[in-house]
Every structure is written in structure tokens, then in C-alpha cells.
Amino acid sequence: MLSTSDTLPGRDVDEVLGIVKGNAIRGSHLGADITAFLRNLIGGEIEEYTKTMAEAREQALDRMIDEARNARADAVVGVRYSTSFIAPGTAEFFVYGTAVRLRPL
Amino acid sequence: MERDDPIVLMRYLDGDLDEGARRELEARIAREPELASELERFRRLHDALGAMRFDEPTDLEWREFWQGFYNRAERVSGWGLVIVGAVLVAGYALYRLLFDPGIDAVLKTGILALALGFVVLFLSILRGWLRVRGLDRYRRIRR
């Protein structure tokens, strides 16, 4: 279970396992960059970069979930996303949160 | 009706009027049937605009759009011209580099080694990418 809030309604945290995180940097190929450049001349959504960002976001999220599963966590709370600029045409996503074990219902 | 009434009515419907202005307008609406009728027209317009939803085209509609003859013809011819132009420019640059007697032999060797090095590195990266390409489950994500 993932949550951006620090608590889960109706559930108590039994144990805090620590920070879990995942990051991914993905790039688009030269053809996509050229098409994106041309789209940028006109305006509107640049689908090539939307796709690159979405790929990086999902990969980073999956890496964080894998780390949480390896720690035998029941949930990750306080999930946050962060991006940074590495190079033109690339997208970096960093996802982190606190892995917790929940008290059984 | 006064000249600014349409703007005041719109602000009233948007909840942007302060308490005093709102009470003043409501008192006028009670006294002036024309203003009340105008407010009702605005309210219908406001509700209709609020109920409007702009649906994004579905993936299938986008695919059909891009697979149309004109789009495909434009893409193929555009990319074809770009590739032909790039090959001609690169070929001419290589020809000038190899056969121009004005360029020093050391510089020629250096540029060729540099270019060849980049090609070898690129092919190495390409080989690695082709190997893991089928395993990359994120490639199909669109947004």
C-alpha cells in the first residue's frame, strides 16, 4: 500500500522500517528529440517527453516498491516525488517514502 | 440594467463579490425583474459551462489519426529527406576531410580517430540496448 499521507486511516503503524527509495533516469532517442523540438515550435503537449517522464516515473516507483517488499514492509507512507535536470531530453524521477509494518487488524 | 451589470452578475455567480456588494445586488434583483431575468440567463450559461467536459481523444482515435495516409506520407517523406540530407552532408564532410590537401595529416588522423571512436562506442551501447530492449517493460508506457 502506498500513500502520500503520513498516516493510514484506520490502520496503526507497528514498526518503522526506514526510508525506501527508487530513481530512474530515462532518455528519448534522437528522432523523438527532433520531433519534440518541432512540436515545441508550435506549442501544446510534447508527447515524446510526456512518455519519457511517465516511463521514468513508473520505473522509479517500481524500484521503491521492490525495496519496500525486500524490507517486508506492509506499506510506504509519506511518498514523495522529485525530479531533477541531468541533460536535455532526459527525465530523472526520484521517489521516496517511509516503509512501515502495520499492526494486524 | 446598468452598463457594468453583466460583469457584476458573473462575479456574483462565481462567488467573487464581497458581502456588501452581494447584498446590494440581491436587493436590486428583488426590485428589478429585468436584472433577475438576466441573472437567470447567466445562471443557465454558468451551469452549462460548468457541466461541459472536454474528453481527450482515446488512444485508438490517436492511432487512427496518425495512421492516416497524409500523416504517414508526411512523416515518411520528412524523415526520408532529413536522412538523405544528413548522409550527403556527412559524406561530403568525410570526402573533404580525406582528400582536401589543405588539411594537415595529423589533424585528419585525429578527426578520423575521434569519429571512429564515437562510432565504436555508439555501436557498443546500441548492442547493449538491443539485448535488453525486449525486457524493458516501461517502453510501452505512454503517459
Image (cartoon, helix red, strand yellow):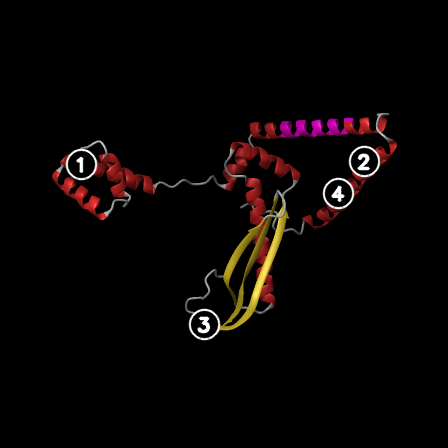
Query: Same chain, marks 2 and 3?
Result: no
Residue at point 28%, 37% (across, down): B45
Looking at the picture, how far across and down is residue B103, in whole percent?
84, 28
Amino acid on which the number 2 mark rests in the picture:
Ile
Q: Which residues are magenta?
A: B76-92
The chain ID associated with circle 2 is B
Query: Same chain, marks 4 and 1?
Result: yes
Amino acid on which the number 1 mark rests in the picture:
Leu
Residue density around tag 2, few if under 14, some if 14–19, many if 20 or more, within 10 Å: some
Amino acid on which the number 3 mark rests in the picture:
Asp
Disc 1 versus disc 3: nearer the observer? 1
Q: Main secondary structure of the magenta part?
A: helix
Q: Can residue A1 be seen?
A: no
In whole angstroms, how far apart are the C-alphas of marks 2 and 3?
Answer: 66 Å
Residue at point 58%, 33% (across, down): A38
Badge 1 element: helix
For mark 1, what is the residue?
A: B35
Badge 4 element: helix
Q: Is B139 one of the magenta-colored residues? A: no
Looking at the picture, how far across and down is residue B14, in whole percent?
29, 43
Looking at the picture, how far across and down is residue A41, in whole percent?
55, 32
For mark 2, what is the residue?
A: B111
The chain ID associated with circle 4 is B
